[in-house]
Amino acid sequence: MTSYAPLANPVFLQACLGQATRYTPVWLMRQAGRYLPEYRATRARAGSFMALATNVDFATEVTLQPLARYPLDAAILFSDILTVPDAMGLGLSFQSGEGPRFARPLQTEADIAALAVPDMDKLRYVFDAVTAIRRALQGRVPLIGFSGSPWTLACYMVEGGSSSDYRVVKTLLYARPDLMHRVLAVNADAVAAYLNAQIDAGAQAVMVFDSWGGVLADGAFQPFSLAYTARVLRQLQRHGPDGAVVPRIVFTKGGGLWLREMVSALPCDTLGVDWTLNLGAARAILAENARPADGAAASAIAPAALQGNLDPGVLFAPPEAIRAQVRAALDSFGPPSHADAARAGVAHIFNLGHGISQFTPPEHVAHLVDEVHGYSRTLRRA
Ligand code: 1CP
């Protein structure tokens, strides 16, 4: 077993489990990416997105870039959700400016019959990157591993790339639900194996991105997205090789309407929410199922924390407006309900409601992070 430096900043992991913290931790979805000139420079040196993601040194370098600029409370593995379908043989590439493309999307019943959980050795480069990044972090902040949800991966696998109307994947869903269920079952088992291997390699928390769950109708979301995210979570190991609990985060973009159903169906610790939801109202829903106050949080079923939910568009405004919107989000969550670290409650991890835009001025992010840390400390003194 690899041994790593002790964790100097456990605030993010504590909040994920509903424990009290001195301030509200913050990280940003897509924090390593195109809005940073240093990312664009490394990507140019690598030549392509896949060359960047499959090289351990490049992946480590870009993961650490946002941490060199801002005092963020977590790092996230630099990779992509589409590595899993690539390992299934679909042939991933990223055309610059156009987003992802699969050379061999799922088009026929035979394609779907042949689909299988890939040999995790094909994803060795991801696990190697996890271990290298964990080592390079030197215990500064925890490392988050991640995957797409079975449904979100299926959108790309069936459409062959990004989509604005999800026409092809919805045709399959409504015309041949049996085939859709087969794709989702394979994806769920692949994602579970992938996340467990990331945990073995050193990931200290894992997050499932259900980025396109919110495009489904009520009544379709439950059997085609929620049920398969639950199937992933049921297979996850709870502890890393060092014995530490590994928090599980699920983010469904546009999933606010189903928050209560997610609370009861998903064995996870933290639910990510987008900006369409009021954090105080969401907190009240989680509090209905609050974890016992006897330190059993780590093994409890109900989610203990919310992650989100600032509109990424706020970051285009001038610094004072950004700071005011940060305070408004922290105020809408409300004061921390528990000052005692041993008592369970609903905690908050500050994030955006979706990935940061590539057009974000990098210096604006510093104002966001500073205001989250500063203002959330004053809320705990009040
Ligand atoms: O050319 C480039 O540099 C490509 C830009 C890019 C980056 C920086 C892509 C292509 N992927 C990534 C990295 C990435 N992707 C990370 C790690 C970086 C970090 O968070 O700091 C993560 C967590 C992802 C996850 C991801 N990829 C999601 C889920 C999160 C979300 O935003 O909803 C999705 C949907 C993707 C697919 C994808 N990969 C890349 C792009 C441009 C897209 C989105 C395409 C689309 O909108 O359909």
Image (cartoon, rainbow, N blue to C red):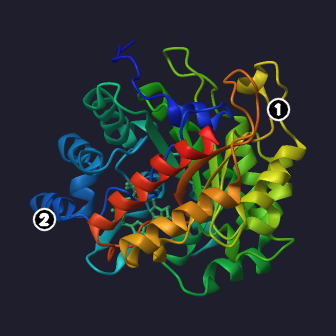
Using residue 7 as the reference point, say whether residue 118 is left or right of it. Answer: right
Neighbor class of circle 1 (other Cα within 10 Å; few <14, some 14-19, many 20+) is many
Judge whether 98 appears above or below 367 on screen: below
What secondary structure is found at the residue carrying circle 1? loop
Q: Label 1, on which residue?
A: 291
Is the CB–ligand 1 distance for label 2 below 8 Å? no
Q: Position of residue 240 (x, y in %)?
A: 53, 22
Sort mark 2 into few (<14), some (14-19) or many (20+) by Cα contacts within 10 Å.
few
Q: Is residue 33 above or below residue 192?
A: below
The secondary element bearing badge 2 is classed as helix
Q: Amino acid at mark 2?
A: Ala
Residue type, mark 1 in image: Arg
Res 302 → quadrant: top right
Q: Is residue 341 visible?
A: yes
Q: Between residue 352 and residue 379, name the one nearer to us.
A: 379
- The image's mark for residue 44 is 2
